[in-house]
Image (tube, rainbow, N blue to C red):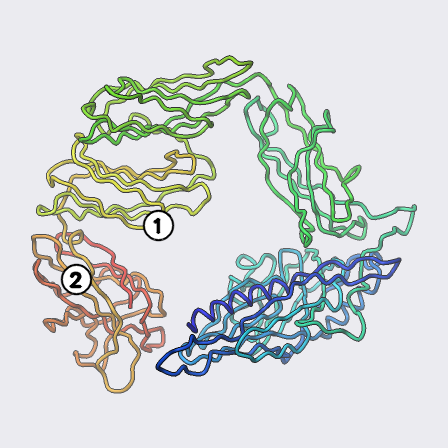
Amino acid sequence: MEFNHNSDVQSDMQELRNSLISVRSAERIVEDEYEIVSDHRPVRVRVGTQYPSRLITFNPPNPMGSLQAETPESEISINNAEVRTPDAYEGNPEGLLNDLEVGVETRFLEYQPQYNEYRNAPNTRIEHSLLYNDFDETDLVVQDQRVIEGRRLNLVLFDGEPQRSVGQTATLDPETLDGPTAPITIEDDGDPIELTIPTKAPELWKNEDVIGESFTEGAARARVITSGDQTVTIELQVDETYQLRVARVGFDGGSVDEEQFTPIQIKETGETGGVDSYPGPNITNLEANPNTGLNRGDTFDLIWEASNIGDENDLRGGTPIQRVEWYLESNPDEKYELYSDQSENLSEYVVSNETTIPVDQRFETGENELRIRGQDSRGRWSENDDIGSVTVDVDSTEERETQIAARIDDLSNNNGARFITSISIRNENENFDRIEVDYEPDATYGSADGTINTTRGSVSYGPRGGLENTDFDITIRVIDEENGGETVAATRTISATADTSNPIEENVSLGSSPQLQSEILDRSNLNDGARYRISYETDQTDAYKETQLHLLETDPGNFDEQTENATETAVDLSTYPFDSEYKIAVLTVDSDGVVVDANIEIKQPEETMAGNTEIVSSAAQEPDVPGNSPDSELAFTLEKDGPSDVTIEGIAFEETSSDAITIEATDQGFADGNSFVRTDTDAVLYSDLINLGAGETGITDETFAQWESPEFILTQFRDTDGNQVNIAGETVTVRLYFADGSSRSYELTG
């Protein structure tokens, strides 16, 4: 119950963190006067809970906790920065940088649980915009920081005293007390800009999941260069401009004596020429690739960037971008969206992307000039030279010949002929209607015809009894429909024999298609026949549907098959006889039903010691030594799954989730240094270091028979300082080497 309550608190703290950093821009009332817009949401935090009533026994005290603010020992500061265009702002942005150089106060917010059973529950803390769990020995990120995002610096300073220590629920109502400032363009003064922030977890900010310690990892253009007991200093890349926004938010309402940040806003009126406002976004870095040799049905990539950040020679709006669109110079009334963000909390001042554009009926033969423009949150569009322009040269606007790409997987077996035909149509016409697939000869019952109503899909055939090893003609037709009539835009016939051999394996995947990685382990033996364990992993994408696994006699006969929706798992397939040839097919299928990736292997079953030896249990345990020691030993039990004896000749320590780098036993019931032991016979298999990543370590040969289930111990796991490592709950991967030349990796859990 306490663990579930802590999970609820984690969710509440995430909601609270999101509400706290949801800061809206200040709104102009009259010239030089602005009004704070507080758009935060009240958030409840389930500080405590109650045990359910019991009829006989008494409950312990109800789980509870405290939610409280804390003032860090140091302040936030920014050094080596200067405002690039101070005259573009109302208020005093240079004065703000002076204040930031001295330091400004902020606060942390922390939930501390008080549980009866869940003793190692973390304290959950909000620092700046980072939400993390503080365990006794480590810190784990719950939600990432938003202080540094590309070229944006978002300083949300917290204030208030939300002391809550109750057994039920507390509600906090955050409020913006000051700001935010307009995005202030800053640059370094010759030395790198340095941002120093207080923190109770300096090592966490150094992690690449937060900021990192180099410019090539973690947050872009930032790295942690120094850290103290409760501070970190972050350096920004030189020769860059950054957009700084500062606001102060109360955890639970509150006020400030004087607004420091709200008055600093973009000037609405230019200084010369009667300009009503600064211009909108500027389109730069514009490219079309390719931009020549194009024909109807081709595509090109439109690469673009829209920026609303100016400089001293190019004053600009400095507000977020909400829309980017393109149009042809020859038809300016028809515009097409490239980017849109209509949310209330716009935050992107620079937007870039690569957009694929089809060459269709909109384009003419010859040069076609594309124009790109952007709009900022003021509603201001790019104008004049700020509008981007690029030319693409189209050789022909005639309809391209429709092309049919196909892949046919032959899954025939003793139930009959069976195929999966995957199809992708390219250069389809505007009046495309459907794809038709015919299999000839048809079965004696029903129709094998299939229809696909999109340009990608698949049609399955069979199994059709009695037609294995029969020759087929598989015909694919693309049908267009126009003015009530139909025409065949393309046709293709592929010859196939229902003998498990794929007749064609063309690429029918897309750039977004999931990719497959798989491994096949032969677990066959004379008693159990053909047995294979197939481990696979595919990309986790929206385009993924399933993975099909097939074990087929190559002369269509016995088979086994399974379909999995998981993106990663291991599946056992088996059938008889042992002395036959088999096709193993691992097929990755996308959301269109198309086989987009595959691993196909032809195998002759082979009985190996590795394939017929399984781990049946594993557990961490405490060494048999005087005093208290961590669970630094790993015991595991092997089982022979086949008719022949097994002999182990070597071992390798391949991977671990723990801090261990070696296995070495000292001061225990076994002789000193004995690191690999069979416990049921007290046989010492190895008596020296087994180092992580060192490859095979030869051992004293150990043989056991089918009816035996020997237990082994690896003892003791140690870190770089030679200290024992507690591996309870950790994973350890070892590879065993066998006398027949086979080997296999096993993942053990402590």
Residue 568 - label: 1
Name the amino acid type tagged 1: Glu
Instruction: Tell me where residue 184 appears, x and y as whole percent.
Output: 75, 59
Residue reaching furthest to the front: 55
Q: Is residue 694 left or right of residue 47?
A: left
Task: Look at the picture and state if 560 lies above or below 698.
Answer: above
Q: In this view, does 655 lie to the left or right of 430?
A: left
Provide residue 403's location: percent of width, then percent of height: 45, 21
Q: Which of marks 2 and 1 is in front?
A: 1
Q: In this view, does 216 lie above or below 421?
A: below
Q: In which quarter of the image is the N terminus?
A: bottom left
The residue shown at (42%, 42%) is 544
Q: Which residue is drawn at 14% across and 72% down?
A: 679
> Alpha carbon of mark 2 to alpha carbon of mark 1: how far?
25 Å
User: Closer to the camera, 740 or 707?
Assistant: 707
Q: Where is 345 relative to 424, above or below? A: below
The amino acid on which the numbered mark 2 sits, given as a three-letter code, is Leu
Secondary element at tag 1: strand
Is residue 748 shown left or right of residue 280?
A: left
Label 2: element kind:
strand
**Residue 227: x percent and y percent?**
57, 73
Q: Which mark is residue 501?
A: none
Crowding at dot 2, Cα within 10 Å, few <14 / some 14-19 / many 20+, comes out as: some
Quarter of the image where one finds residue 280: top right
Q: Residue at x 17, y 48 (%)?
A: 523
- In which image quadrant can residue 495 be found? top left
Classify 310 as above or below 670.
Answer: above
Q: Residue furthest right?
A: 273
Residue beneath label 2, please?
Answer: 638
Q: Which residue is drawn at 77% across and 48% down?
A: 378
Q: In which quarter of the image is residue 659?
A: bottom left
